[in-house]
Amino acid sequence: MADRPNDPLRRPLDVELLRRSLVAPGILADLEHVESIDSTNAALQREAGEPDFARRRPHLSLLVAEEQTGGRGRMARGWSSPRHTSLSASLVLRPRLDADAMPWISLVAGLALVEALVEEHGVPARLKWPNDVLVDGRKICGILAVLAPGNAVAGAASGSSGSSGPTVPTVILGTGINVLQEEDQLPVEGSTSLMLERRRAGAAADVGLLPGDDPARADLRADLLIQFMARFVGHLTTLESCRRGEVRYSPVGRAAVEAMETVGRRVRIELPDGSARRGEAVGVADDGALEVVVDAERSSAEEPWREHAARRTSFSAGDVVHLRPAEEPPGAAG
């Protein structure tokens, strides 16, 4: 993966701007910035076992790194990026949500980023269930929400350990967004970056800025983080106000499904046991599971597909592949 340390666009995040825009108005509780880290999610998970974690990392505390060297996404996939090119950040959450609604955290985070990319940058982003953001099929962001070890704290969502009341789980929401990478710096084949997509949308080809942008003041990474966090915290507040069983019918639930490229597509679901199902994704259940009308299955990648009568099935885990017609001829093993 190529690095370009002298590129004028690749400079440290404007941390003071981030604090003025996110912490001062109360959108976030705290923001810590580090130069390099193995993984922001892993670092917070290690800290979570310490006695004073709730005090040091209250609800809506953000850890952001200039460089991540050993990130992990779903299915333990590795993720890293050159310094000063991406957004590697993890947010500590203590959401007031029923257990069934917890999977929606990743979905509304994806929605927030889709909205920021579409509304602020003119990039036609879409959400892929459960936690990727795509642009014309190219991955621009991965999101991973995990429960922190020893995760429950007593009392308010602020994380104050001295409060009374029911326990609140601690969730760590990790996000890796490709922002300034060139083609040869992207973490995986088939991915993209905000700068590349802005070029495709008609931005100036040499710096990846939109017409009228001032290159001397441009900080795409800080701008995008502010736009993303503000939208996500608003969506989380709406999610917390939903009564049990109503998330998918709420404004934020409907918006997430409408932003989802997966729903309405033929898909293949690769399950953790090596088996797979194939069918049409038709919706998202109130617990965040993907609802698919399944019409074929196989027990392993080496086995042929077996077609059967269509039946609606919910999937809470699995790797989703969006299919094109050429990828699923009758009886195909792909």
Image (spheres, helix red, strand yellow):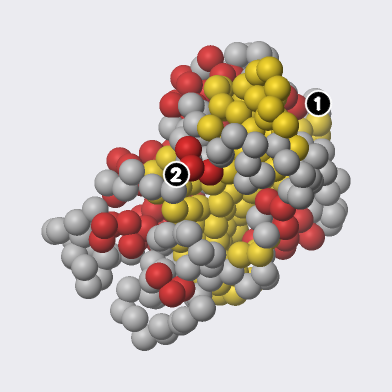
Q: Tag 2, which secondary structure?
A: helix
Q: Is residue 236 left or right of residue 7?
A: right
Residue located 50% across and 75% down the image: 82
Q: Position of residue 5 (x, y in %)?
A: 42, 84
Q: Residue at x 39, y 67 (%)?
A: 180
Which residue sits at x=67%, y=69%? 70
Q: What type is the residue that disc 2 sits on?
A: Leu
Q: Residues within 10 Å of mark 1 (few under 14, many from 20)?
A: few
Q: Is residue 131 something that shows in the picture?
A: no
Say which residue label 2 marks.
113
Earlier in the chain: of badge 2 and badge 1, it is 2
Where does the image place residue 295, in percent across and percent down from the top left? 65, 25
Nearest to viewer (mark 2 / mark 1): 2
Identified by mark 1, the residue type is: Pro
Is residue 9 visible to the viewer in this orientation of the structure? Answer: yes
| Residue 222 image-quadrant placement | bottom left
Checking the image for residue 166, the label placed there is 1
The quarter of the displayed image where residue 194 is located? bottom left
Q: Residue at x 69, y 27 (%)?
A: 307
Front residue of 100/309: it is: 309
Above or below, 149 relative to 152: below
Q: Give x and y (percent) for residue 311.
A: 68, 17
